[in-house]
Image (tube, rainbow, N blue to C red):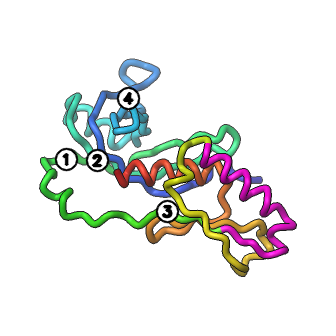
Amino acid sequence: MSDKFLTLSEFNLEGGFLGFVGKKPRKMKYLSLAISSGSVLVRLPKKLRVALSSSLEIGEQINIYGISKLNRHKGTIKLKARQVTKIADRSHLDQDLPPQPPAKIMVCQKAGCMKRGGKGLLSELEQTLCDRGLLDKVTIEHTSCQKRCSSAPNCILMLGKKKYKKNCPQAIASLLEQYLTTEE
């Protein structure tokens, strides 16, 4: 029996605090954050809810570190915060940061992987990336055997120094969107 949620990766978001959100007035389960591509809801653990309710002001710049999980059935990503910090004026620090390495997807092109769905995976991956406008921002590299033939078709997503293996095209596109929004 598999879990409903698949842990994808850690995230580090920076943006403006928009307020707390919850179904009941005094139950602030989520924090609303304004980022460059819109606004996101991040779930807060109970320990952070009490501490942040009195210290954050709307419009304040904050940094959120946490974990993202993929709902396998719905295809949605859930963000859960581990740490929330206020940001001081850091405009002078941004100039010294080196650019992040480009994202790369390595797809196995050996006969075993191709027979087990490699062609379909590659075409579905290209279609998903094209639909989201990410095809020109990532390089797809055709490789030889990746020595994981038992779990074919094989595809590895490289984001900087991190490797993500055995992901569906929708999860890969979501990870790329997160990576590229933090890069800009």
Secondary element under disc 3, as helix, strand or loop, is: strand
Q: CA distance from mark 4 to mark 3?
A: 36 Å
- Circle 4/circle 3 CB separation < 8 Å: no
The amino acid at mark 1 is Ile
Who comes first in sequence, dot 1 or dot 4? 4
Q: Are marks 2 and 1 in contact (CB under 8 Å)?
A: yes
Q: Specify the amino acid type for callout 2.
A: Asn
Residue occupied by mark 1: 87
Residues at discs 3 and 2 in contact (Cβ within 8 Å): no
Vertical order, 109 against 137 (above or below): below
- The majority secondary structure of the magenta stretch comes to helix
- Residue at (80%, 70%) from the top-left corner? 113
The span from disc 2 to disc 1 (Cα, nearest Å) is: 6 Å
Residue at (74, 57) in percent of width and height: 121
Taking 125 as reference, is 115 above or below it? below
Q: Nearer the viewer, residue 47 or 56?
A: 56
Labels 4 and 2: the sequence-earlier one = 4
How busy is the neighbourhood of tag 3: few (under 14 within 10 Å), some, or many (20 plus)? some
Q: Of the residues under marks 4 and 3, which one precedes in the sequence?
A: 4
Residue occupied by mark 2: 63
